[in-house]
Protein backbone atom coordinates (compact mmCIF):
# COMPACT_ATOMS: atom_id res chain seq x y z
CA UNK A 1 0.00 0.00 0.00
CA UNK A 2 1.24 3.50 -0.84
CA UNK A 3 2.05 5.60 2.22
CA UNK A 4 0.96 9.19 1.79
CA UNK A 5 1.00 10.13 5.44
CA UNK A 6 -1.92 12.57 5.22
CA UNK A 7 -2.86 13.98 8.62
CA UNK A 8 -6.29 14.95 9.88
CA UNK A 9 -6.43 18.72 10.09
CA UNK A 10 -8.76 21.65 9.60
CA UNK A 11 -9.43 22.63 6.02
CA UNK A 12 -8.51 25.90 4.38
CA UNK A 13 -11.17 27.90 2.54
CA UNK A 14 -8.62 30.21 0.92
CA UNK A 15 -9.44 29.02 -2.59
CA UNK A 16 -12.88 30.58 -2.11
CA UNK A 17 -11.81 33.77 -0.35
CA UNK A 18 -8.34 34.42 1.04
CA UNK A 19 -9.84 36.17 4.07
CA UNK A 20 -13.52 36.56 5.03
CA UNK A 21 -12.92 39.80 6.91
CA UNK A 22 -10.51 41.53 4.55
CA UNK A 23 -10.77 43.84 1.59
CA UNK A 24 -11.07 40.91 -0.81
CA UNK A 25 -14.67 40.37 0.28
CA UNK A 26 -15.58 43.91 -0.71
CA UNK A 27 -13.74 43.50 -4.01
CA UNK A 28 -15.65 40.31 -4.76
CA UNK A 29 -18.92 42.01 -3.86
CA UNK A 30 -18.00 44.87 -6.19
CA UNK A 31 -17.23 42.44 -8.99
CA UNK A 32 -20.59 40.79 -8.41
CA UNK A 33 -22.27 44.19 -8.48
CA UNK A 34 -20.61 44.94 -11.84
CA UNK A 35 -21.55 41.57 -13.31
CA UNK A 36 -25.14 42.08 -12.18
CA UNK A 37 -25.30 45.55 -13.69
CA UNK A 38 -23.88 44.15 -16.93
CA UNK A 39 -26.64 41.56 -17.08
CA UNK A 40 -29.30 44.16 -16.22
CA UNK A 41 -28.02 46.29 -19.07
CA UNK A 42 -28.94 43.48 -21.48
CA UNK A 43 -32.59 43.52 -20.42
CA UNK A 44 -33.75 45.74 -23.30
CA UNK A 45 -32.15 43.35 -25.83
CA UNK A 46 -34.22 40.37 -24.72
CA UNK A 47 -36.83 39.55 -27.32
CA UNK A 48 -38.23 36.37 -28.91
CA UNK A 49 -36.54 37.24 -32.20
CA UNK A 50 -33.23 38.48 -30.74
CA UNK A 51 -30.05 37.44 -32.55
CA UNK A 52 -28.47 34.24 -31.21
CA UNK A 53 -25.20 35.98 -30.43
CA UNK A 54 -26.96 38.48 -28.13
CA UNK A 55 -28.62 35.62 -26.31
CA UNK A 56 -25.22 33.94 -25.90
CA UNK A 57 -23.94 37.18 -24.40
CA UNK A 58 -26.73 37.14 -21.81
CA UNK A 59 -25.99 33.52 -20.87
CA UNK A 60 -22.30 34.36 -20.40
CA UNK A 61 -23.26 37.32 -18.19
CA UNK A 62 -25.50 35.04 -16.14
CA UNK A 63 -22.63 32.59 -15.69
CA UNK A 64 -20.41 35.37 -14.43
CA UNK A 65 -22.99 36.37 -11.81
CA UNK A 66 -23.43 32.73 -10.78
CA UNK A 67 -19.67 32.22 -10.39
CA UNK A 68 -19.24 35.17 -8.05
CA UNK A 69 -22.45 34.42 -6.18
CA UNK A 70 -21.34 30.81 -5.59
CA UNK A 71 -18.04 32.03 -4.22
CA UNK A 72 -19.62 34.48 -1.76
CA UNK A 73 -22.63 32.34 -0.91
CA UNK A 74 -20.78 29.12 -0.15
CA UNK A 75 -18.14 30.60 2.14
CA UNK A 76 -20.50 31.28 5.05
CA UNK A 77 -22.07 27.80 5.29
CA UNK A 78 -18.64 26.14 5.09
CA UNK A 79 -17.19 28.45 7.72
CA UNK A 80 -20.29 27.92 9.88
CA UNK A 81 -19.95 24.12 9.61
CA UNK A 82 -16.40 24.36 11.03
CA UNK A 83 -17.90 25.85 14.17
CA UNK A 84 -21.64 26.25 14.43
CA UNK A 85 -21.36 28.64 17.38
CA UNK A 86 -19.05 31.06 15.55
CA UNK A 87 -20.69 34.50 15.62
CA UNK A 88 -18.54 35.87 12.80
CA UNK A 89 -19.45 33.00 10.51
CA UNK A 90 -23.13 33.53 11.28
CA UNK A 91 -22.88 37.26 10.68
CA UNK A 92 -21.06 36.69 7.38
CA UNK A 93 -23.64 34.13 6.30
CA UNK A 94 -26.51 36.47 7.16
CA UNK A 95 -24.91 39.36 5.28
CA UNK A 96 -24.31 37.23 2.17
CA UNK A 97 -27.78 35.71 2.25
CA UNK A 98 -29.32 39.17 2.14
CA UNK A 99 -26.92 40.38 -0.52
CA UNK A 100 -27.52 37.35 -2.72
CA UNK A 101 -31.28 37.51 -2.32
CA UNK A 102 -31.01 41.08 -3.63
CA UNK A 103 -28.85 40.03 -6.57
CA UNK A 104 -31.17 37.14 -7.32
CA UNK A 105 -34.06 39.58 -7.42
CA UNK A 106 -32.26 41.94 -9.74
CA UNK A 107 -31.60 39.21 -12.30
CA UNK A 108 -34.94 37.49 -11.87
CA UNK A 109 -36.21 39.18 -15.02
CA UNK A 110 -34.03 36.94 -17.17
CA UNK A 111 -35.44 33.68 -15.89
CA UNK A 112 -39.03 35.02 -16.00
CA UNK A 113 -38.61 36.23 -19.57
CA UNK A 114 -37.03 32.94 -20.56
CA UNK A 115 -39.85 30.86 -19.10
CA UNK A 116 -42.48 32.98 -20.85
CA UNK A 117 -41.09 32.39 -24.35
CA UNK A 118 -42.98 30.24 -26.84
CA UNK A 119 -41.41 26.82 -27.39
CA UNK A 120 -40.23 27.54 -30.92
CA UNK A 121 -38.44 30.76 -29.91
CA UNK A 122 -36.86 29.07 -26.89
CA UNK A 123 -35.72 26.14 -29.01
CA UNK A 124 -34.09 28.43 -31.53
CA UNK A 125 -32.19 30.33 -28.83
CA UNK A 126 -31.13 27.19 -26.97
CA UNK A 127 -28.72 26.46 -29.80
CA UNK A 128 -26.72 29.49 -28.61
CA UNK A 129 -26.74 28.62 -24.91
CA UNK A 130 -23.50 26.65 -25.04
CA UNK A 131 -23.05 24.36 -22.08
CA UNK A 132 -25.73 26.24 -20.14
CA UNK A 133 -28.32 24.56 -22.36
CA UNK A 134 -29.72 21.97 -19.96
CA UNK A 135 -29.93 24.53 -17.15
CA UNK A 136 -32.15 26.67 -19.34
CA UNK A 137 -34.21 23.72 -20.52
CA UNK A 138 -34.81 22.79 -16.92
CA UNK A 139 -35.87 26.33 -15.99
CA UNK A 140 -38.68 26.05 -18.49
CA UNK A 141 -40.05 22.99 -16.70
CA UNK A 142 -41.16 25.40 -13.98
CA UNK A 143 -43.05 27.59 -16.41
CA UNK A 144 -46.47 26.75 -14.98
CA UNK A 145 -45.31 27.13 -11.38
CA UNK A 146 -43.76 30.56 -11.64
CA UNK A 147 -45.27 33.74 -10.21
CA UNK A 148 -44.94 37.34 -11.30
CA UNK A 149 -41.71 39.27 -10.81
CA UNK A 150 -42.84 41.23 -7.71
CA UNK A 151 -44.22 38.05 -6.11
CA UNK A 152 -41.04 36.08 -6.75
CA UNK A 153 -39.03 38.95 -5.30
CA UNK A 154 -41.03 39.04 -2.10
CA UNK A 155 -40.61 35.30 -1.60
CA UNK A 156 -36.84 35.57 -2.06
CA UNK A 157 -36.50 38.45 0.35
CA UNK A 158 -38.76 37.06 3.04
CA UNK A 159 -37.20 33.58 2.96
CA UNK A 160 -33.82 34.86 4.12
CA UNK A 161 -35.10 35.85 7.54
CA UNK A 162 -38.08 33.53 7.39
CA UNK A 163 -37.94 29.81 6.72
CA UNK A 164 -34.19 29.72 5.97
CA UNK A 165 -33.46 31.39 9.28
CA UNK A 166 -35.76 28.99 11.13
CA UNK A 167 -33.92 26.00 9.67
CA UNK A 168 -30.58 27.55 10.71
CA UNK A 169 -31.97 27.70 14.25
CA UNK A 170 -32.59 23.94 14.06
CA UNK A 171 -28.89 23.49 13.25
CA UNK A 172 -27.80 25.79 16.03
CA UNK A 173 -29.91 24.04 18.64
CA UNK A 174 -28.99 20.49 17.65
CA UNK A 175 -25.27 21.06 17.02
CA UNK A 176 -24.91 22.38 20.53
CA UNK A 177 -26.23 19.18 22.10
CA UNK A 178 -23.85 17.38 24.44
CA UNK A 179 -24.38 13.67 25.04
CA UNK A 180 -23.18 11.66 28.00
CA UNK A 181 -22.41 7.98 28.01
CA UNK A 182 -20.77 5.67 30.48
CA UNK A 183 -17.95 3.78 28.81
CA UNK A 184 -15.62 1.50 30.79
CA UNK A 185 -17.03 2.77 34.08
CA UNK A 186 -16.44 6.41 33.21
CA UNK A 187 -19.06 8.93 32.10
CA UNK A 188 -17.84 10.99 29.15
CA UNK A 189 -19.23 13.82 27.06
CA UNK A 190 -19.70 13.32 23.32
CA UNK A 191 -20.83 15.01 20.15
CA UNK A 192 -23.63 13.21 18.30
CA UNK A 193 -21.22 11.66 15.80
CA UNK A 194 -19.06 10.32 18.58
CA UNK A 195 -22.10 9.03 20.44
CA UNK A 196 -23.45 7.27 17.36
CA UNK A 197 -20.27 5.24 16.92
CA UNK A 198 -21.45 3.33 19.99
CA UNK A 199 -24.49 1.96 18.17
CA UNK A 200 -21.93 -0.32 16.49
CA UNK A 201 -20.47 -1.44 19.80
CA UNK A 202 -20.32 -5.20 20.53
CA UNK A 203 -22.03 -4.65 23.88
CA UNK A 204 -25.86 -4.74 23.66
CA UNK A 205 -26.10 -2.50 26.76
CA UNK A 206 -23.86 0.17 25.27
CA UNK A 207 -25.74 0.12 21.96
CA UNK A 208 -29.04 0.64 23.76
CA UNK A 209 -27.56 3.31 26.03
CA UNK A 210 -26.21 5.29 23.05
CA UNK A 211 -29.62 5.44 21.36
CA UNK A 212 -31.39 6.17 24.63
CA UNK A 213 -29.02 9.06 25.30
CA UNK A 214 -29.57 10.44 21.82
CA UNK A 215 -33.33 10.42 22.29
CA UNK A 216 -33.12 11.72 25.87
CA UNK A 217 -31.33 14.85 24.67
CA UNK A 218 -33.47 15.41 21.57
CA UNK A 219 -36.64 14.76 23.53
CA UNK A 220 -35.85 17.66 25.85
CA UNK A 221 -36.12 20.01 22.88
CA UNK A 222 -38.78 17.99 21.07
CA UNK A 223 -41.51 20.66 21.39
CA UNK A 224 -39.26 23.26 19.71
CA UNK A 225 -37.77 20.88 17.12
CA UNK A 226 -41.11 19.47 16.02
CA UNK A 227 -42.55 22.99 15.85
CA UNK A 228 -39.69 24.01 13.55
CA UNK A 229 -40.56 21.06 11.33
CA UNK A 230 -44.23 22.03 11.27
CA UNK A 231 -43.25 25.51 10.10
CA UNK A 232 -40.99 24.05 7.44
CA UNK A 233 -43.84 21.90 6.14
CA UNK A 234 -46.44 24.68 6.27
CA UNK A 235 -44.13 27.11 4.54
CA UNK A 236 -43.60 24.54 1.77
CA UNK A 237 -47.34 23.94 1.46
CA UNK A 238 -48.13 27.65 1.31
CA UNK A 239 -45.57 28.25 -1.39
CA UNK A 240 -45.66 25.07 -3.47
CA UNK A 241 -49.32 24.12 -3.22
CA UNK A 242 -51.20 27.39 -2.78
CA UNK A 243 -49.01 29.76 -4.77
CA UNK A 244 -47.23 27.55 -7.30
CA UNK A 245 -49.95 24.96 -7.79
CA UNK A 246 -47.89 21.81 -7.56
CA UNK A 247 -50.05 18.69 -7.36
CA UNK A 248 -48.34 17.53 -4.13
CA UNK A 249 -45.53 18.63 -1.81
CA UNK A 250 -43.16 16.00 -3.23
CA UNK A 251 -43.95 17.00 -6.85
CA UNK A 252 -41.94 20.21 -6.42
CA UNK A 253 -38.85 18.22 -5.42
CA UNK A 254 -39.42 15.71 -8.23
CA UNK A 255 -39.56 18.46 -10.82
CA UNK A 256 -36.40 19.98 -9.37
CA UNK A 257 -34.78 16.57 -9.74
CA UNK A 258 -36.32 16.26 -13.21
CA UNK A 259 -37.66 12.82 -12.32
CA UNK A 260 -41.29 12.07 -13.23
CA UNK A 261 -43.61 11.60 -10.24
CA UNK A 262 -44.41 8.07 -11.43
CA UNK A 263 -40.75 7.07 -11.35
CA UNK A 264 -40.43 8.22 -7.73
CA UNK A 265 -43.62 6.35 -6.86
CA UNK A 266 -42.26 3.22 -8.54
CA UNK A 267 -38.98 3.53 -6.66
CA UNK A 268 -40.75 3.92 -3.30
CA UNK A 269 -43.19 1.11 -4.10
CA UNK A 270 -40.35 -1.27 -4.95
CA UNK A 271 -38.60 -0.35 -1.70
CA UNK A 272 -41.76 -1.20 0.25
CA UNK A 273 -42.27 -4.40 -1.73
CA UNK A 274 -38.65 -5.49 -1.22
CA UNK A 275 -38.43 -4.64 2.50
CA UNK A 276 -38.54 -8.41 3.28
CA UNK A 277 -34.99 -8.66 1.81
CA UNK A 278 -33.74 -6.69 4.80
CA UNK A 279 -36.24 -8.18 7.22
CA UNK A 280 -34.82 -11.62 6.43
CA UNK A 281 -31.31 -10.26 6.99
CA UNK A 282 -32.27 -8.87 10.40
CA UNK A 283 -33.72 -12.21 11.44
CA UNK A 284 -30.53 -13.97 10.37
CA UNK A 285 -28.49 -11.36 12.16
CA UNK A 286 -30.38 -12.04 15.40
CA UNK A 287 -29.44 -15.73 15.04
CA UNK A 288 -25.78 -14.94 14.41
CA UNK A 289 -25.73 -12.70 17.46
CA UNK A 290 -27.49 -15.37 19.54
CA UNK A 291 -30.50 -13.16 20.24
CA UNK A 292 -34.12 -14.33 19.98
CA UNK A 293 -35.01 -11.14 18.14
CA UNK A 294 -33.08 -8.03 17.14
CA UNK A 295 -33.97 -4.85 19.01
CA UNK A 296 -33.89 -1.67 16.96
CA UNK A 297 -30.83 -0.81 19.07
CA UNK A 298 -28.98 -3.78 17.55
CA UNK A 299 -29.40 -3.01 13.88
CA UNK A 300 -25.76 -2.09 13.34
CA UNK A 301 -24.29 -4.53 15.86
CA UNK A 302 -21.01 -6.03 14.65
CA UNK A 303 -21.04 -9.79 14.14
CA UNK A 304 -17.78 -10.28 15.96
CA UNK A 305 -16.10 -8.57 18.87
CA UNK A 306 -13.58 -6.21 17.38
CA UNK A 307 -14.68 -3.09 19.21
CA UNK A 308 -11.21 -1.75 19.81
CA UNK A 309 -10.16 -1.80 16.22
CA UNK A 310 -9.34 1.78 15.24
CA UNK A 311 -7.80 2.75 11.95
CA UNK A 312 -5.50 5.77 12.03
CA UNK A 313 -6.57 8.53 9.70
CA UNK A 314 -3.52 8.40 7.44
CA UNK A 315 -3.96 4.66 6.98
CA UNK A 316 -7.64 5.12 6.16
CA UNK A 317 -6.78 7.69 3.50
CA UNK A 318 -4.21 5.33 1.98
CA UNK A 319 -6.76 2.52 1.85
CA UNK A 320 -9.25 4.72 0.05
CA UNK A 321 -6.76 6.17 -2.42
CA UNK A 322 -5.38 2.70 -3.17
CA UNK A 323 -8.83 1.35 -3.94
CA UNK A 324 -9.39 4.27 -6.32
CA UNK A 325 -6.00 3.80 -7.90
CA UNK A 326 -6.72 0.20 -8.69
CA UNK A 327 -9.93 1.21 -10.42
CA UNK A 328 -8.43 4.11 -12.33
CA UNK A 329 -5.26 6.11 -11.58
CA UNK A 330 -6.97 9.18 -13.04
CA UNK A 331 -9.77 8.89 -10.49
CA UNK A 332 -7.25 8.44 -7.64
CA UNK A 333 -5.39 11.57 -8.69
CA UNK A 334 -8.58 13.60 -8.63
CA UNK A 335 -9.31 12.42 -5.08
CA UNK A 336 -5.74 13.19 -4.03
CA UNK A 337 -6.31 16.85 -4.88
CA UNK A 338 -8.71 17.18 -1.94
CA UNK A 339 -5.85 16.32 0.43
CA UNK A 340 -3.09 18.16 -1.40
CA UNK A 341 -5.14 21.36 -1.47
CA UNK A 342 -6.10 21.06 2.20
CA UNK A 343 -9.80 20.96 1.34
CA UNK A 344 -10.73 18.27 3.86
CA UNK A 345 -11.71 18.87 7.48
CA UNK A 346 -11.85 15.48 9.19
CA UNK A 347 -10.88 16.13 12.80
CA UNK A 348 -13.32 16.00 15.71
CA UNK A 349 -14.01 19.33 17.38
CA UNK A 350 -16.73 20.56 19.69
CA UNK A 351 -19.29 22.74 17.89
CA UNK A 352 -18.31 21.43 14.46
CA UNK A 353 -21.19 20.28 12.30
CA UNK A 354 -21.82 16.55 12.58
CA UNK A 355 -21.83 13.93 9.85
CA UNK A 356 -20.00 14.25 6.58
CA UNK A 357 -20.53 16.06 3.29
CA UNK A 358 -18.78 17.18 0.16
CA UNK A 359 -19.40 20.63 -1.23
CA UNK A 360 -18.43 21.49 -4.79
CA UNK A 361 -18.61 25.19 -5.53
CA UNK A 362 -17.17 25.98 -8.94
CA UNK A 363 -16.19 23.88 -11.95
CA UNK A 364 -12.55 22.87 -11.62
CA UNK A 365 -12.19 24.11 -8.04
CA UNK A 366 -11.24 21.22 -5.75
CA UNK A 367 -14.37 20.42 -3.69
CA UNK A 368 -14.48 20.73 0.11
CA UNK A 369 -15.02 17.62 2.22
CA UNK A 370 -16.14 17.66 5.83
CA UNK A 371 -16.02 14.50 7.94
CA UNK A 372 -15.82 13.65 11.62
CA UNK A 373 -13.24 10.88 11.54
CA UNK A 374 -13.34 8.85 14.75
CA UNK A 375 -11.29 5.87 13.49
CA UNK A 376 -14.05 3.25 13.34
CA UNK A 377 -13.52 0.95 10.35
CA UNK A 378 -16.76 2.00 8.71
CA UNK A 379 -15.64 5.60 8.68
CA UNK A 380 -13.16 4.59 6.03
CA UNK A 381 -16.21 3.92 3.87
CA UNK A 382 -17.53 7.39 4.71
CA UNK A 383 -14.27 8.92 3.49
CA UNK A 384 -14.52 6.89 0.27
CA UNK A 385 -18.11 8.07 -0.09
CA UNK A 386 -17.41 11.80 0.25
CA UNK A 387 -14.35 11.59 -1.96
CA UNK A 388 -16.54 9.91 -4.55
CA UNK A 389 -18.61 13.11 -4.60
CA UNK A 390 -15.45 15.15 -5.10
CA UNK A 391 -14.38 12.93 -7.99
CA UNK A 392 -17.81 13.34 -9.57
CA UNK A 393 -17.51 17.14 -9.45
CA UNK A 394 -13.97 17.15 -10.78
CA UNK A 395 -14.88 14.85 -13.68
CA UNK A 396 -17.53 17.41 -14.63
CA UNK A 397 -15.06 20.31 -14.41
CA UNK A 398 -15.40 21.20 -18.10
CA UNK A 399 -19.03 22.21 -17.76
CA UNK A 400 -20.57 25.58 -17.12
CA UNK A 401 -21.06 26.80 -13.57
CA UNK A 402 -24.76 26.36 -14.36
CA UNK A 403 -24.51 22.66 -15.29
CA UNK A 404 -21.55 21.00 -13.58
CA UNK A 405 -23.53 20.05 -10.45
CA UNK A 406 -25.28 16.74 -10.99
CA UNK A 407 -28.99 16.51 -10.29
CA UNK A 408 -29.74 15.14 -6.80
CA UNK A 409 -30.77 11.61 -7.84
CA UNK A 410 -27.53 11.22 -9.80
CA UNK A 411 -25.49 12.86 -7.06
CA UNK A 412 -24.92 9.62 -5.15
CA UNK A 413 -23.71 7.61 -8.13
CA UNK A 414 -19.96 8.11 -7.68
CA UNK A 415 -20.07 8.15 -3.88
CA UNK A 416 -21.78 4.79 -3.50
CA UNK A 417 -19.66 3.26 -6.26
CA UNK A 418 -16.54 4.44 -4.40
CA UNK A 419 -17.75 2.82 -1.21
CA UNK A 420 -18.20 -0.45 -3.05
CA UNK A 421 -14.74 -0.28 -4.57
CA UNK A 422 -13.39 0.06 -1.04
CA UNK A 423 -15.48 -2.82 0.32
CA UNK A 424 -14.37 -5.08 -2.52
CA UNK A 425 -10.77 -4.23 -1.92
CA UNK A 426 -11.10 -5.03 1.76
CA UNK A 427 -12.72 -8.37 0.88
CA UNK A 428 -9.96 -9.32 -1.57
CA UNK A 429 -7.24 -8.55 0.94
CA UNK A 430 -8.88 -10.31 3.85
CA UNK A 431 -8.50 -14.06 4.23
CA UNK A 432 -9.85 -14.47 7.74
CA UNK A 433 -13.38 -15.76 7.15
CA UNK A 434 -14.69 -14.07 10.30
CA UNK A 435 -13.45 -10.66 9.28
CA UNK A 436 -14.73 -11.17 5.73
CA UNK A 437 -18.15 -11.91 7.17
CA UNK A 438 -17.99 -8.67 9.15
CA UNK A 439 -17.07 -6.64 6.09
CA UNK A 440 -19.91 -8.13 4.09
CA UNK A 441 -22.41 -7.66 6.91
CA UNK A 442 -21.35 -4.03 7.29
CA UNK A 443 -21.94 -3.54 3.58
CA UNK A 444 -25.49 -4.88 3.99
CA UNK A 445 -25.97 -2.66 7.07
CA UNK A 446 -24.90 0.32 4.98
CA UNK A 447 -27.16 -0.69 2.10
CA UNK A 448 -30.03 -0.83 4.58
CA UNK A 449 -29.21 2.64 5.90
CA UNK A 450 -29.00 4.12 2.41
CA UNK A 451 -31.80 2.34 0.57
CA UNK A 452 -34.60 1.25 2.86
CA UNK A 453 -34.18 3.63 5.77
CA UNK A 454 -34.09 6.66 3.46
CA UNK A 455 -37.07 5.48 1.44
CA UNK A 456 -39.08 5.14 4.66
CA UNK A 457 -38.04 8.64 5.72
CA UNK A 458 -39.63 9.90 2.52
CA UNK A 459 -42.73 7.79 3.08
CA UNK A 460 -42.96 9.37 6.52
CA UNK A 461 -42.50 12.86 5.08
CA UNK A 462 -45.25 12.22 2.54
CA UNK A 463 -47.64 11.34 5.35
CA UNK A 464 -46.37 14.03 7.70
CA UNK A 465 -47.07 16.77 5.14
CA UNK A 466 -50.67 15.56 4.90
CA UNK A 467 -51.03 15.21 8.65
CA UNK A 468 -49.71 18.69 9.32
CA UNK A 469 -52.08 20.11 6.73
CA UNK A 470 -54.86 18.38 8.64
CA UNK A 471 -53.72 19.99 11.89
CA UNK A 472 -52.24 16.91 13.57
CA UNK A 473 -50.04 17.39 16.64
CA UNK A 474 -46.39 16.45 17.23
CA UNK A 475 -47.58 13.55 19.44
CA UNK A 476 -49.58 12.21 16.51
CA UNK A 477 -46.53 12.57 14.28
CA UNK A 478 -44.49 10.60 16.80
CA UNK A 479 -47.06 7.82 16.82
CA UNK A 480 -47.15 7.82 13.06
CA UNK A 481 -43.38 7.52 12.93
CA UNK A 482 -43.59 4.39 15.09
CA UNK A 483 -46.18 2.96 12.71
CA UNK A 484 -43.85 3.71 9.79
CA UNK A 485 -41.08 1.74 11.54
CA UNK A 486 -43.46 -1.13 12.20
CA UNK A 487 -44.21 -1.36 8.48
CA UNK A 488 -40.56 -1.12 7.58
CA UNK A 489 -39.39 -3.90 9.89
CA UNK A 490 -42.43 -6.19 9.97
CA UNK A 491 -41.89 -8.65 12.81
CA UNK A 492 -38.13 -8.82 12.27
CA UNK A 493 -37.12 -6.15 14.79
CA UNK A 494 -38.46 -5.06 18.14
CA UNK A 495 -39.02 -1.30 18.24
CA UNK A 496 -39.02 0.55 21.53
CA UNK A 497 -41.11 3.66 22.19
CA UNK A 498 -38.10 6.00 22.30
CA UNK A 499 -37.74 5.69 18.51
CA UNK A 500 -40.83 7.88 18.14
CA UNK A 501 -38.36 10.81 18.34
CA UNK A 502 -36.08 9.58 15.59
CA UNK A 503 -37.61 11.80 12.92
CA UNK A 504 -36.71 15.02 14.73
CA UNK A 505 -33.06 13.88 14.59
CA UNK A 506 -32.92 13.87 10.76
CA UNK A 507 -31.54 17.18 9.45
CA UNK A 508 -32.38 16.38 5.81
CA UNK A 509 -36.13 16.51 6.31
CA UNK A 510 -35.65 20.03 7.70
CA UNK A 511 -33.08 21.26 5.17
CA UNK A 512 -34.36 19.71 1.98
CA UNK A 513 -37.73 17.98 2.22
CA UNK A 514 -37.91 14.71 0.25
CA UNK A 515 -34.19 14.80 -0.43
CA UNK A 516 -33.70 11.32 1.01
CA UNK A 517 -35.10 9.28 -1.87
CA UNK A 518 -32.08 10.46 -3.84
CA UNK A 519 -30.05 8.13 -1.61
CA UNK A 520 -32.26 5.13 -2.36
CA UNK A 521 -32.20 6.09 -6.04
CA UNK A 522 -28.43 6.53 -6.08
CA UNK A 523 -27.56 3.40 -4.14
CA UNK A 524 -29.80 1.08 -6.17
CA UNK A 525 -28.51 2.66 -9.37
CA UNK A 526 -24.91 2.32 -8.22
CA UNK A 527 -25.40 -1.29 -7.18
CA UNK A 528 -26.60 -2.16 -10.63
CA UNK A 529 -23.79 -0.19 -12.29
CA UNK A 530 -21.28 -1.86 -10.02
CA UNK A 531 -22.70 -5.23 -10.96
CA UNK A 532 -22.15 -4.32 -14.60
CA UNK A 533 -18.57 -3.29 -13.81
CA UNK A 534 -17.91 -6.65 -12.19
CA UNK A 535 -19.27 -8.47 -15.20
CA UNK A 536 -17.56 -6.40 -17.86
CA UNK A 537 -14.41 -5.36 -15.99
CA UNK A 538 -12.32 -2.43 -17.13
CA UNK A 539 -14.25 -2.27 -20.41
CA UNK A 540 -17.10 -0.70 -18.42
CA UNK A 541 -14.97 2.09 -16.96
CA UNK A 542 -15.31 4.55 -19.88
CA UNK A 543 -19.12 4.19 -19.76
CA UNK A 544 -19.14 4.86 -16.04
CA UNK A 545 -16.79 7.82 -16.23
CA UNK A 546 -18.91 9.23 -19.03
CA UNK A 547 -22.03 9.06 -16.83
CA UNK A 548 -20.14 11.00 -14.16
CA UNK A 549 -18.59 13.54 -16.47
CA UNK A 550 -22.04 14.67 -17.61
CA UNK A 551 -22.37 16.34 -14.22
CA UNK A 552 -25.71 18.12 -14.49
CA UNK A 553 -25.45 18.95 -18.18
CA UNK A 554 -28.22 16.54 -19.20
CA UNK A 555 -31.32 15.08 -17.57
CA UNK A 556 -31.05 11.88 -15.50
CA UNK A 557 -33.34 10.31 -18.09
CA UNK A 558 -30.94 11.19 -20.92
CA UNK A 559 -27.81 10.06 -19.07
CA UNK A 560 -29.33 6.78 -17.90
CA UNK A 561 -30.96 5.91 -21.21
CA UNK A 562 -27.56 6.29 -22.83
CA UNK A 563 -26.18 3.82 -20.29
CA UNK A 564 -28.99 1.39 -21.17
CA UNK A 565 -31.08 1.96 -18.04
CA UNK A 566 -34.85 2.46 -17.92
CA UNK A 567 -35.66 4.14 -14.60
CA UNK A 568 -39.42 3.81 -15.14
CA UNK A 569 -39.12 0.01 -15.00
CA UNK A 570 -39.78 -1.49 -11.56
CA UNK A 571 -37.54 -4.41 -12.51
CA UNK A 572 -34.57 -2.10 -12.78
CA UNK A 573 -34.98 -1.13 -9.12
CA UNK A 574 -35.65 -4.75 -8.16
CA UNK A 575 -32.28 -5.54 -9.76
CA UNK A 576 -30.57 -3.39 -7.13
CA UNK A 577 -32.29 -5.39 -4.40
CA UNK A 578 -31.15 -8.63 -6.11
CA UNK A 579 -27.55 -7.54 -5.54
CA UNK A 580 -28.27 -6.97 -1.83
CA UNK A 581 -30.07 -10.30 -1.62
CA UNK A 582 -26.97 -11.91 -3.15
CA UNK A 583 -24.84 -10.48 -0.36
CA UNK A 584 -27.30 -11.74 2.27
CA UNK A 585 -27.24 -15.20 0.65
CA UNK A 586 -23.47 -15.22 0.78
CA UNK A 587 -23.68 -14.50 4.49
CA UNK A 588 -26.42 -17.03 5.28
ZN1 LIG B 1 -23.44 11.24 -0.41
Image (spheres, rainbow, N blue to C red):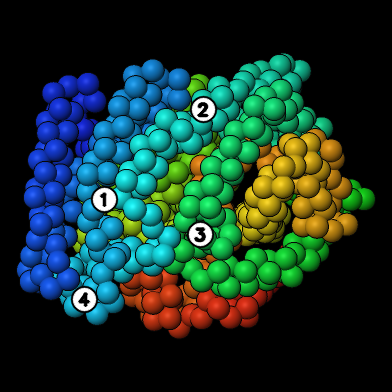
Residue drawn at the location 15% of the way across and 44% of the way down: 36
Asked if residue 240 lies left or right of residue 134, the reply is right
* Dot 1 and dot 3 residues touching (CB under 8 Å): no
- Distance, label 1 to label 3, CA atoms, is 20 Å
* Dot 1 and dot 4 residues touching (CB under 8 Å): no
Residue drawn at the location 42% of the way across and 70% of the way down: 556
Q: Earlier in the sequence, mark 1 or mark 2?
A: 1
Between residue 588 and residue 514, name the one nearer to us: 514
- Taking 528 as reference, is 154 above or below it? above
Q: Earlier in the sequence, mark 1 or mark 3?
A: 1
Asked if residue 456 lies left or right of residue 507, the reply is right
Secondary structure found at label 2? helix
- Distance, label 1 to label 2, CA atoms, is 28 Å
- Local crowd size for mark 2, using a 10 Å CA cut-off: few (<14), some (14–19), many (≥20): some
Asked if residue 554 lies left or right of residue 56, the reply is right
* Dot 1 and dot 2 residues touching (CB under 8 Å): no
The disc at residue 121 is 4
- Local crowd size for mark 3, using a 10 Å CA cut-off: few (<14), some (14–19), many (≥20): some
Q: Disc 3 designates what residue? A: 245
Q: Quadrant of the C terminus?
A: bottom right
Residue ranking furthest to the right: 292
Task: Please name which of the two marks, 1 or 3, marks the residue nearer to the observer.
Answer: 3
**Can the viewer see residue 115?**
yes
Between residue 503 and residue 241, name the one nearer to us: 241
* Dot 2 and dot 4 residues touching (CB under 8 Å): no
Secondary structure found at label 1? helix
Q: Earlier in the sequence, mark 1 or mark 4?
A: 1
Q: Disc 1 designates what residue? A: 108
Q: Position of residue 420 (x, y in %)?
A: 52, 61
Q: Earlier in the sequence, mark 2 or mark 3?
A: 2
Q: Disc 2 designates what residue? A: 169
Find out if the beta carbon at label 1 lies less than 8 Å from the nearest ligand 1 atom.
Answer: no
Amino acid sequence: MTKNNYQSTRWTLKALLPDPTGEVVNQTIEALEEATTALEALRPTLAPDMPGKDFAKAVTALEKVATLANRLGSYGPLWFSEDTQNQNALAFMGRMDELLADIQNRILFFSLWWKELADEDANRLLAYAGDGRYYLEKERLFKDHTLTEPEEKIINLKDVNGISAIVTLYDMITNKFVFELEVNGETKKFTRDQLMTYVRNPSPEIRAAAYQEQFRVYQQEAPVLSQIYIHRVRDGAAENLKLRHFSSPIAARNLGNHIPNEVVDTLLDVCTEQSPVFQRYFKLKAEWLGMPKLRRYDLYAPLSDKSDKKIPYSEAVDMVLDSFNEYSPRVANLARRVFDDGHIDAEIRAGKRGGAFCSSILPGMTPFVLANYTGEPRQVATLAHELGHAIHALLAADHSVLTFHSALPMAETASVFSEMLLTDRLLTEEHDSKVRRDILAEAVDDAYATVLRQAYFVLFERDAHQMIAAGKTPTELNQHYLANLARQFGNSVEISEDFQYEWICIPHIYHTPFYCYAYSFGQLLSLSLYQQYKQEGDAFTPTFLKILSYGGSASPQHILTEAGINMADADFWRGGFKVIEGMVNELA
